[in-house]
């Protein structure tokens, strides 16, 4: 049973560029949440997708957008990258009506230069 | 909006010492509480969770946590730590009654010295 997978593992981008990160949820899960984890900080909630719609959103600007596909996989897009966007981006999957427990992927390390 | 505070940022213990990591949250309603652990080079894993019922919950690897509603606390404990417990520990909260965003604390790095 595959857990949550994310790609790519590492990414280096230049300020102003755009980036797309991908996540495949754990088998059987229907909800995907994205988090940003800066160095020395806890994960910060970006948004959550269920039934291909954004259901909840944290305090992140519109430069951060996402998508969920019919197979429940998800993408996180960040436009006009800033140096401060450098972080570990975590994807977590869960069951929408399953009691809140989230399973995390290994993350994508984004470096903006 | 909810918030979570973890007061200990870095804890160093010798093997067999007892562990208690503090977690306090701020939210006006009912919450569900979690402790996650991140071992070096690994992804976040659920250690234990509290939804309702007995405020003392037991998790994996001998960890337990006690929910004290009057103190808005959910402290993590282990009677005797091992070197393999070296990791970063995160407390997290989510309001009950609807699927809402999870708020994490800033984490506590635990280093266990053999």
Image: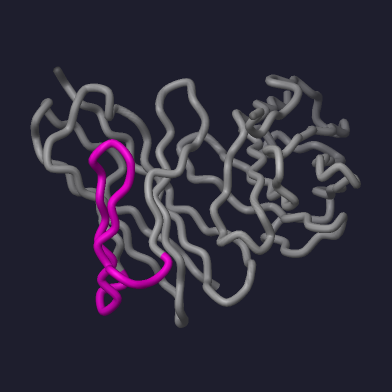
Q: Residue at x 39, y 71 (%)?
A: B52
- The image shows a total of numbered marks equal to 0
Q: How far from the left and from the top, in percent, is residue B49?
A: 40, 56
Is B69 included in the stretch rendered in magenta?
A: yes
Residue A73 in view in this figure: yes
Q: Residue at x 89, y 45 (%)?
A: A69
B109 left or right, relative to B15? right
B70 left or right, relative to A81? left
**Residue B74 vs residue A16, the one in the foreground:** B74
Q: How far from the left and from the top, in percent, is residue A55?
A: 77, 64
Q: How far from the left and from the top, in percent, is residue B47?
A: 38, 44
Residue A87 in view in this figure: no
Extent of the magenta region: B51-72
Is B4 included in the stretch rendered in magenta?
A: no
Name the image colouring.
one colour
Quadrant where the N terminus of chain B sits is bottom right
Note whether B59 is above or below B57 in the view shown: above
Tell me where residue A1 sits by quadrant. Answer: top right
Q: How far from the left and from the top, in percent, is residue B91?
A: 40, 52
Q: Residue at x 9, y 35 (%)?
A: B17
Tell me where residue B114 sits by quadrant. Answer: top left
Note whether B113 is above or below A50 in the view shown: above
Q: Residue lying farthest right?
A: A70
**Residue A30 vs residue B71, the one in the foreground:** A30
A24 left or right, relative to B74? right
Note whether B101 is above or below B64 in the view shown: below
**Residue B95 vs residue A16, the one in the foreground:** B95
Note whether B80 is above or below A66 in the view shown: above
B16 left or right, relative to A30? left
């Amino acid at each position: 049973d595959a857990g949550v997978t994310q790609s790519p593992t590492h990414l280096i981008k230049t300020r102003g560029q755009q980036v797309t990160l991908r996540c495949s949820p754990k088998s059987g899960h229907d909800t995907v949440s994205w988090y940003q984890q800066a160095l020395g900080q806890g994960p910060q909630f970006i948004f959550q997708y269920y039934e291909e719609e954004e259901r909840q959103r944290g305090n992140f600007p519109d430069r951060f957008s996402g998508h969920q596909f019919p197979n429940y996989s998800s993408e996180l897009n960040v436009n006009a990258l800033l140096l401060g966007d450098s972080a570990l981006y975590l994807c977590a999957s869960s069951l929408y009506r399953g009691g809140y427990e989230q399973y995390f992927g290994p993350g994508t390390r984004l470096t903006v230069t | 909006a909810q918030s979570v505070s973890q007061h200990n940022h870095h804890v160093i213990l010798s093997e067999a010492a007892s562990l208690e990591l503090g977690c306090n949250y701020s939210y006006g309603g009912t919450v569900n509480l979690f402790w996650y652990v991140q071992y070096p080079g690994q992804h976040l894993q659920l250690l234990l969770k509290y939804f309702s019922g007995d405020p003392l919950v037991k998790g994996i690897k001998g960890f337990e946590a006690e929910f004290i509603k009057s103190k808005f606390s959910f402290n993590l404990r282990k009677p005797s730590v091992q070197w393999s417990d070296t990791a970063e520990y995160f407390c997290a909260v989510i309001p009950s009654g609807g699927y809402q965003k999870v708020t994490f604390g800033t984490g506590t790095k635990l280093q266990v010295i053999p």
